[in-house]
Every structure is written in C-alpha cells, then in structure tokens.
C-alpha cells in the first residue's frame, strides 16, 4: 500500500458534474482481490491517516491530486498532422491525413510513433484513451504493445476503410473484418487494454464492411465501437448521396447494428432531436472534440440540445484534427463552444462541468464509471499531480482563487503540460510514477 497527501479533487457521484476538494487529503492506494492497484480510501488527512498508520506516505505540499484525464477520441497516427491548414474536413483528410497514415504500413514507423504518442499522453496527464490506429493491423499491435508497457488504459482499433480512400490506406472488405476479429482475440481484455471496432466513417466503408462491423459488434458485446458522425456539412451531403433513403447520417450506423452502449461517435455536431433521441435510446455517447471543430471550422457541439434530450458525452482532443494533447486546452475550447447557442444568460459550461467531461463523465460514456476518471474507493489508481504555481502568471491567479470553480478555471484557462508535475498509473505491485519532463 501507499498513501499520498495533498489537496485532492474527485467526483462524489461520478454521474453528476460536481467536484469536491479535500484541501488536506489523503489518498490510499493498494491492491484489490484481483491484484489491481485501486483506491482504498480517500478523505481528510486527519481522519484517514490513523486508519493507515505505517503506510508509506508521499507528501505533495501545495499540489493538487486529480483523476487522470480520459481522452474519448484521438488518432495515434495523426501526431504529425496537427496544425495542417485545410478548407475543411474532406480536403484535410485527402491532402494531409491519408498521406501520413500510409506511413504506418512500416513497422518501425508505427513503433516509433507509438512510443512518442504514449509519452505525450502521459506528459499531459491522460491515463485512459480511446484511439484510432490506421487501417494497417501492424499499427494496432504497435500501439497496444506500447500501452501495455506503459500500463495505460487504452482502447483502440484498426480503422476500417474499404472505399473512397487512396491506395496504401484502403483495406479489403473480408480481410479487414478477419483482421478485426483476430485483433479482438489478441488484445481485448489483456491487462487494461480494450478493443474498439473502428469504421472510419460512413463514406469510407462499403455497406458490406459496415454490416460485418455490426455483426462483430453483436458477437462481442463488451468490445467498444468508435467512429465519426455529423462533423461537416460536405461530409453529410456525401452520406446523403450514398444513402438517400436514410433518415439521417446517424441512422445509417443504426441500420448496420453499430449503435449500442460502448459506441462512441466523435463530433455529433449537425444533429436534430431525432438523432439525439437515438443516441439516448441506444446508449451510444458523443466524443466532443472542440479544438478540432474550431480548427477545421466544422461547427459547434450543441450542449443544450444534448442535455435537453439527455445522451452521454465527454471530451476528446481529436489529435490531429484537434490542435493539442493538453486536456486544459480542450476544456478551454469546450468553454468557448458552450458560448455558442447559449440560451440562458450567465456562464457557459462551469469549470467543474468541463473537468467532469474530461474525467468521470468521459469514463461514464465508456461504460467505465467506478473504474476510471475518478478517485473514489475501488477506482483504478490513475492520477495526476498538478502544480497550480507552475507558471508565474498561474501562480498569481490561482493564489487569488476564492472558490473551487475559480481554482479550476485558473488552471483551465492558463494551464498546459507545465502544470502536470507527475502522472501516476495504477500498476499491479505498485504505482508507477511518470515524472513530467517539463
Ligand atoms: N472523419 C473521417 N476520418 C476522420 C479523421 O481522421 N478526423 C476527423 N476529425 N474526422 C474524420
Ligand atoms: Zn477523429
């Protein structure tokens, strides 16, 4: 067992976007019955410490311990795509993304980028991620192997794309489905790894490929599904031309059996209430990707609409359409997006709500409430140690914070990877510290 003394941020009810702060708290971590390193206790130091006398305690004076961040949608092969200028989604895919993804047919390139990608996640405090690889099965093996080494909770999949894509990234229908099933059997449930069936988006998948993906989703109900939907107007017009009889873009996924709990759809911008009701009734959830949506000019996720109908969502970087690995940048962009279409006067999204979307809320969207994204007893012990004095400006501003919301907002607005002093990952036999190299 090991204990950590600091201010500790957590979500008393993981389904509610309200945080609590233990100003002088103690977090006790130890193995559960299965040998996983989980939170054993969390509370005021004065109350918890006597119950764990003799447990070695690491002190973090002036620091804030918070749940490791959960990135609900990210592309591992798009590290070198960040910041590529394009008129919009489709030319961006054609001119920058597909050419970069082609390079992952080479094993050494996949392995090198997997190492870089995982280090970047940890440096930014991300301890759980749902990631696209490329259409090359080797890229999935490289990514999982690296995640297994670093103990990250990673869910990932081979991209399915058998049409409307260039040579070098386009796959073949039957082989792509056989590869997907082989990868599920190789990786799903190994340590903290999970598989996600990954049709890229409707235009890049034949009906046969979507049907096959839906059949695999039915055969393996605890495997995740990830895709993109309703991101961009030109993309939507393309789907309408391909499926003129479909009620909406989202309904095409439903038609092929790809809407269910553990299905995460990136963007979900251009929805109507019937789409929102379909998300709710099927238990699918949205990966809100605000830096990507602002960068590519895709539009604004409608938070009021999502809450009115009531479907699940969480935050995502969407690197490389997204511009940053930093959860602080993503939360700030979500605040800006929440301003659009704001119906009531007052704040956009509250700082606690933004933080929840990138931790406990995102974990809930993945069906991992009580496992990831929080520090309640029983949760896996993944956390970050944040330094609110990391920069001179942040030190000034955070010192004057008069409430939890003000403290969190100072970090959201002024924060980046410099704030993340340490990322600690749950590990059988002890927690592994990844000191930040900032
Ligand atoms: N739609 C299909 N592929 C992609 C992708 O790689 N990124 C984004 N943002 N949207 C997509
Ligand atoms: Zn994406």
Image (cartoon, rainbow, N blue to C red):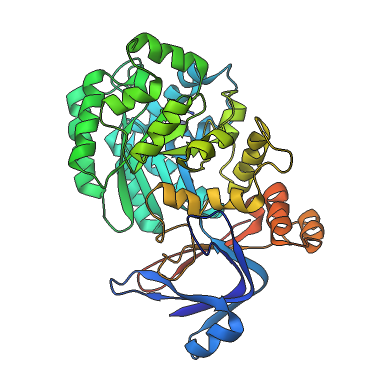
In the image, residue 63 sits, relative to residue 191, either above or below, namely: below
Between 294 and 46, the residue placed more toward the observer is 46
Tell me the quadrant of the picture where the N terminus can be found.
bottom left
State the residue at coordinates (43%, 58%): 372
Between 211 and 36, the residue placed more toward the observer is 211
Which quadrant of the view contains residue 369? bottom left
Whether residue 397 can be seen here = yes
Q: Is residue 18 left or right of residue 208?
A: right
Where is residue 91 drawn, in percent x and y? 51, 16
Between 95 and 29, the residue placed more toward the observer is 29
* Ligand 1 positioned in quadrant: top left
Tell me the quadrant of the picture where the C terminus can be found.
bottom right
Where is residue 435 drawn, in percent x and y? 56, 63
Between 327 and 149, the residue placed more toward the observer is 327
**Total marks in image:** 0
State the residue at coordinates (60%, 35%): 291
Which quadrant of the view contains residue 107? top left
Q: Is residue 338 left or right of residue 57?
A: right
Whether residue 132 can be seen here = no
In the image, residue 231 sits, relative to residue 331, either above or below, namely: above
Which quadrant of the view contains residue 162? top left
Where is residue 161 drawn, in percent x and y? 31, 24
């Amino acid at each position: 067992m090991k204990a950590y003394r600091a201010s500790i941020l957590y979500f008393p009810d993981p389904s509610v976007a309200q945080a609590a702060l233990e100003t002088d708290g103690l977090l006790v971590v130890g193995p559960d019955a299965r040998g996983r390193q989980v939170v054993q206790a969390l509370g005021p130091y004065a109350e918890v410490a006597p119950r764990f006398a003799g447990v070695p305690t690491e002190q973090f004076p002036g620091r804030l311990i918070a749940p490791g961040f959960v990135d609900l949608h990210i592309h591992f092969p798009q590290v070198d795509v960040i910041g590529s200028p394009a008129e919009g989604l489709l030319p961006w895919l054609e001119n920058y993304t597909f050419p970069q993804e082609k390079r992952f047919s080479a094993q050494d390139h996949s392995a090198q980028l997997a190492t870089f990608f995982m280090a970047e996640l940890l440096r930014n405090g991300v301890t759980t991620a749902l990631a696209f690889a490329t259409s090359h099965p080797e890229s999935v093996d490289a990514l999982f192997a690296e995640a297994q080494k670093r103990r990250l909770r990673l869910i990932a999949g081979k991209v399915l794309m058998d049409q409307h894509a260039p040579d070098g990234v386009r796959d073949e229908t039957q082989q792509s489905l056989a590869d997907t099933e082989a990868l599920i059997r190789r990786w799903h449930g190994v340590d903290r790894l999970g598989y996600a069936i990954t049709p890229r988006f409707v235009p890049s998948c034949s009906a046969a490929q979507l049907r096959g993906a839906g059949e695999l989703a039915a055969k393996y109900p605890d495997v995740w599904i990830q895709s993109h939907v309703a991101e961009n107007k030109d993309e939507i017009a393309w789907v309408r031309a391909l499926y003129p009889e479909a009620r909406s873009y989202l309904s095409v996924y439903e038609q092929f059996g790809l809407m269910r709990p553990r299905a995460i759809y990136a963007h979900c911008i251009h929805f109507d209430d019937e789409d929102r009701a379909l998300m709710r009734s099927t238990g699918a959830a949205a990966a809100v990707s605000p830096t990507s949506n602002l960068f590519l000019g895709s539009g604004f996720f409608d938070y009021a609409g999502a809450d009115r109908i009531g479907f699940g969502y969480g935050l995502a970087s969407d690197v490389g359409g997204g511009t940053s690995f930093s959860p602080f940048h993503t939360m700030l962009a979500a605040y800006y997006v929440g301003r659009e279409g704001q119906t009531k006067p007052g704040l956009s999204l509250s700082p606690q709500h933004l933080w929840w979307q990138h931790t406990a809320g995102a974990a809930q969207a993945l069906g991992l409430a009580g496992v990831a994204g929080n520090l309640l007893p029983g949760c896996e012990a993944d956390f970050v140690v944040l330094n609110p004095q990391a920069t001179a400006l942040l030190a000034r501003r955070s010192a004057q914070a008069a409430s939890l919301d003000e403290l969190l907002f100072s970090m959201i607005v002024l924060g980046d990877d410099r704030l993340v002093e340490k990322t600690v990952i749950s590990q059988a036999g002890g927690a592994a510290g990844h000191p930040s190299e900032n």
